[in-house]
Image (tube, helix red, strand yellow):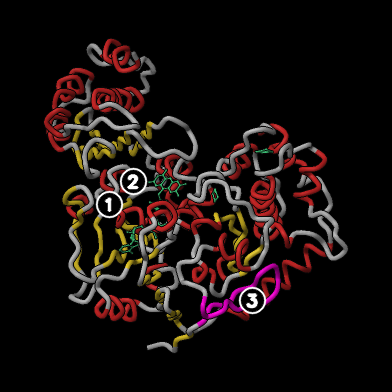
Amino acid sequence: MAATRDYVVFLLNGERHEVPRSVPPTRTLLEYLREDLGLKGTKEGCNEGDCGACTVVVMEPEQRSTLAVNACILLVPMLDGKSVTTVDGLFGPSGELHPCQQAMLECHGSQCGFCTPGFVMSLFAMYQDVMEYHDGKPPTKKWINTVLAGNLCRCTGYGSIVAAAERMFALPRPEWDVSRQAVNEFRAIGLRSKASLAVKNANGQFYAPLALVELIELRRIQPDSIILGGATDVCLWANKQLRPLPILISTARVGELQQFSHGVGRMRIGAAVTYEAAWSTLEMVWPNLGELIRRLGSEQVRNSGTIGGNIANGSPIGDMPPALMALGSTLVLNGPEGQRRMPLEEFFLAYGKQDRKPGEFVEAVEVPSHETGDRRLRCYKISKRFDQDISAVLGCFYLHIDNGVVTSARIAFGGMAGIPNRAKAVEAALEGKPWTMATVEAALPKFEEDFQPLSDARASKEYRMLTAKNLLVRYFHEMTSDVQTRLVGDGERIIAEVMA
Ligand SMILES: Cc1cc2nc3c(=O)[nH]c(=O)nc-3n(C[C@H](O)[C@H](O)[C@H](O)COP(=O)(O)OP(=O)(O)OC[C@H]3O[C@@H](n4cnc5c(N)ncnc54)[C@H](O)[C@@H]3O)c2cc1C
Ligand code: FES
Ligand code: FES
């Protein structure tokens, strides 16, 4: 067993900061900054990861990254060993503005100013990342839009903020910024501990083991503990539902769970791998999956959130399970009774219930992958807003067509039942048949055998069923390059009724 340390230490705006042992392990970074340390530059808007007003930047030297994250959905012990920069720490030694602040000023990127610290920090993360790790090459407008999608502004309008994002790369980089980054990196490496973390006080317990065996042992002793990946779901339980989180075990530093490998025929994604860490490889192999990830949460959410957490959470509208199911993934579980594997879809038993033994946790997901640029996988996310929104319906299709015949069909949906699930009757109606519109039309009624969706705030059951059918038609047209996508049956009438 590795040595353990019982206190949290991180770099805060370049200075070593040791967190008092009395601070509850469930205190969010936002509460800690504003209420305990009096650093009020970081704002609270929604307190649920949606608005980006609380954005701070975390640097992890080993990962060569500067990441924008939401302080309202991060717990203080999660920062252990990292470098945290807040808007209060951006100025130069004589009060000079950082290029990201200067550009906002020049481009009139602020009006009431409430969102401004959050935007500035997202710009700062992008600036440092580009300058330090991407040869200073200015990002494309698409990339800027992607980075800023997690920050909401209700009065300035985004045009001037996007202009500021472009402008900051045209400004000279101050020498003090270069040296400050180097010093922070050096100091952060010095803080990285070889000890696992065990913080305990009257308010709760937080563990961050380093190795799989430690995690298994902790789970054996405390099977009712709550596992923490990036906390983008768990923090909402505390912030919004006021649920107590007495014992937390973080997977973020468990070496085996952080591994992400792509070998011949198989990709293995450790449960603690974040979207950000996996994104570029997943996009290279399945371009459309890359697009789906771009629409999952925001830059801040993807920088913290893990793929393992998305699976383990078991939400019927989580975005990764349907895509990974369509690809034929295997889930690897581990725990006090040993390791076991299962097809991903078998993990989800019923709404809120997964196939997990006491103390068991998600170790990894393994995905068959045979070629890069595989465009047969299509993931259609239907949500009310393009960015930063949860799916009303997510349809993922992965069909193999040989000589005009469907040789295999894997189709999975989110938002159509209490769990993410495959459309097995539809798949059976397609397999072995010629890949024609007639086959597709004959398969459409089978959706009603596979799913009985519910109506809720996101969509009505009629809308969901019609959408699912139309997505298969869309897939057919996209795969056969026929742009004449048409509505199914009396779809137009149903849409009119739903909207009325
Ligand atoms: C603003 C915002 C937008 C979002 N948008 C989307 C979206 O568009 N699409 C989407 O799918 N999700 C979205 N989410 C939800 C969330 O970001 C994802 O579900 C994310 O993948 C959760 O990962 P995490 O590491 O943060 O999980 P955590 O919050 O740490 O954990 C989630 C659950 O999984 C459990 N868990 C975590 N890791 C393991 C493990 N290894 N073994 C066993 N149990 C484990 C936890 O105990 C908890 O029950 C959004 C969240 C926010 C705050
Ligand atoms: S306060 Fe809105 S994202 Fe944190
Ligand atoms: S400047 Fe007012 S919300 Fe953005």
Q: Whole-Å distance between the Cαs marked 3 and 2?
A: 36 Å
**Quadrant in the rendering for residue 484:** top left
Answer whether residue 172 is magenta in the image: no
The answer for how far apart the CA atoms under marks 3 and 1 are is 36 Å
Query: At which x and y percent is residue 108?
Result: 78, 36
Amino acid on which disc 3 is placed: His
Q: CA distance from mark 1 to mark 2?
A: 7 Å
SS under mark 1: loop
Determine which of the numbered discs, if any, sits on residue 314 in the image: 1
The reply to whether discs 1 and 2 touch (Cβ–Cβ < 8 Å) is yes
Going by the numbered disc 2, the residue's amino acid type is Gly
Residue 412, horizontal then vertical, whole percent: 25, 40
Residue 498 placement (x, y as % from top left): 30, 17
Residue drawn where x is 34% and y is 32% of the image: 457
Residue 357 shown left or right of residue 55 in the figure: left
Left or right: 43, with 201 as reference point: right
- Asked if the residue at label 2 sits under 8 Å from ligand 1, the reply is yes
Count of numbered circles on the image: 3
Q: Which sits in the foreground, 236 or 310?
A: 236
* Label 3 vs 1, first from the N-terminus: 3
According to the picture, the residue beneath numbered tag 2 turns out to be 318
Ligand 1 lies under 8 Å from the Cβ of mark 1: yes
Q: Which residue is mark 3?
A: 17
401 or 302, nearer to the observer: 302
Q: Residue at x 24, y 27 (%)?
A: 461
Judge whether 356 appears above or below 380 on screen: below
The N terminus, quarter of image: bottom left
Tell me which segment is drawn in magenta: 7-22
Pointer 2: residues within 10 angstroms few (<14), some, or many (20+)? many
| Residue at screen point 80% across, 42% down | 105
